[in-house]
Image (spheres, rainbow, N blue to C red):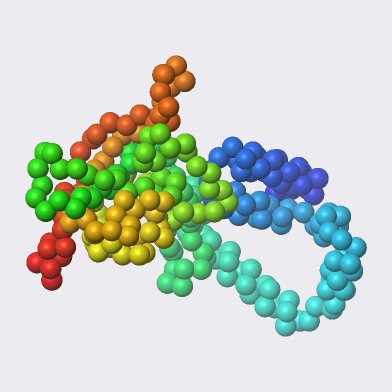
């Protein structure tokens, strides 16, 4: 509808706006819905957009529109448009391909790329739970204290939080890491190292550091859990139910890093 008559173009944009507003109020997709809403503005011409702004702003817009366009400006616009069309060929071919790839770059300058969040929606939610201990010797009786992220599921009694339109990058990346069968990202090891040093950065990035202001943990480990929403029929204050899956990163200490170096 975006590429046909104006009345259909506006109708299509209006439908997308309504849909994105529904997602904004019912989902937790950070700033992504706002980005899509901004993109729909190209479907409305100046006459429509003028009705949404103050009279003084309309006058400033009109002054800009009334300025003559030079041959140089037109030539530059045509050059840019042609470049975008040429560079869009490979991304568009990827979009209609049965083996579509997301977040792919197609030229050395990364000008026109494909971007996407989900190739598919996972049916099972796995979460990495990080915990530490100040005990010098590990055993079955070791007391582990869990780190709590700002919004990522951890404590089963904590109500799921609302972040939109903010984007908690660390929580987001932890969720993606949990989808992988084993630890792959080097930054997870760096995160564990900062926790072992009780770095102040950890306090700023997390909702709760059980070792903040006290003795640093001697060991840190990561375990993989399966999370499910608890049912209304269950007589429990827990929002989540979780079950242990496996060890994601075995317990490590600063000695491991010194030996590696």
**Quadrant of the rendering where the N terminus is positioned:** top right
Between 243 and 102, which is closer to the camera in this rendering?
A: 243
Report the side of 167 relative to 40 (left or right).
left
- Tell me the residue at 25%/54% (across/down): 184
- Tell me the residue at 59%/37% (across/down): 26
Q: Position of residue 127 (x, y in %)?
A: 33, 41
- Tell me the residue at 51%/59% (across/down): 89
Q: Is residue 130 visible?
A: yes
Between 122 and 190, which is closer to the camera in this rendering?
A: 190
Compared to 83, does 70 lie above or below?
A: below
The image quadrant of residue 57 is bottom right
Compared to 231, does 76 lie above or below?
A: below
- Tell me the residue at 35%/60% (across/down): 202
Q: How many marks?
A: 0
Report the side of 172 relative to 69 (left or right).
left
Q: Position of residue 149 (x, y in %)?
A: 39, 49
**Quadrant of the rendering where the C terminus is positioned:** bottom left
Q: Position of residue 65 (x, y in %)?
A: 84, 71
Compared to 201, does 243 lie above or below?
A: above
């Amino acid at each position: 509808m975006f590429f046909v008559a104006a009345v259909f173009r506006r109708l299509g944009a209006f439908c997308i706006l309504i849909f994105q507003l529904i997602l904004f109020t019912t989902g937790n997709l950070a700033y992504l819905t706002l980005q899509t809403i901004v993109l729909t503005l190209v479907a409305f011409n100046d006459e429509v957009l003028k009705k949404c702004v103050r009279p003084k702003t309309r006058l400033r817009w009109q002054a800009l529109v009334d300025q003559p366009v030079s041959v140089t400006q037109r030539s530059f616009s045509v050059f840019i448009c042609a470049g975008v069309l040429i560079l869009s060929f490979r991304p568009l071919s990827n979009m209609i391909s049965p083996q579509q790839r997301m977040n792919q770059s197609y030229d050395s300058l990364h000008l026109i790329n494909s971007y996407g969040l989900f190739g598919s929606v996972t049916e099972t939610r796995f979460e990495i739970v990080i915990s530490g201990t100040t005990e010098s010797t590990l055993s079955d009786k070791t007391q582990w204290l869990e780190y709590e992220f700002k919004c990522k599921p951890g404590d089963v009694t904590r109500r799921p939080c609302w972040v939109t339109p903010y984007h908690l990058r660390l929580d987001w990346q932890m969720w993606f890491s949990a989808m992988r069968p084993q630890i792959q990202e080097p930054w997870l090891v760096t995160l564990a190292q900062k926790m072992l040093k009780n770095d102040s950065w950890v306090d700023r990035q997390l909702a709760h550091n059980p070792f903040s202001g006290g003795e640093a943990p001697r060991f840190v480990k990561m375990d993989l859990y399966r999370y499910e929403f608890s049912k209304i029929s269950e007589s429990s204050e827990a929002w989540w139910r979780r079950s242990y899956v496996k060890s994601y990163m075995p317990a490590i200490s600063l000695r491991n890093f010194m030996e590696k170096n």
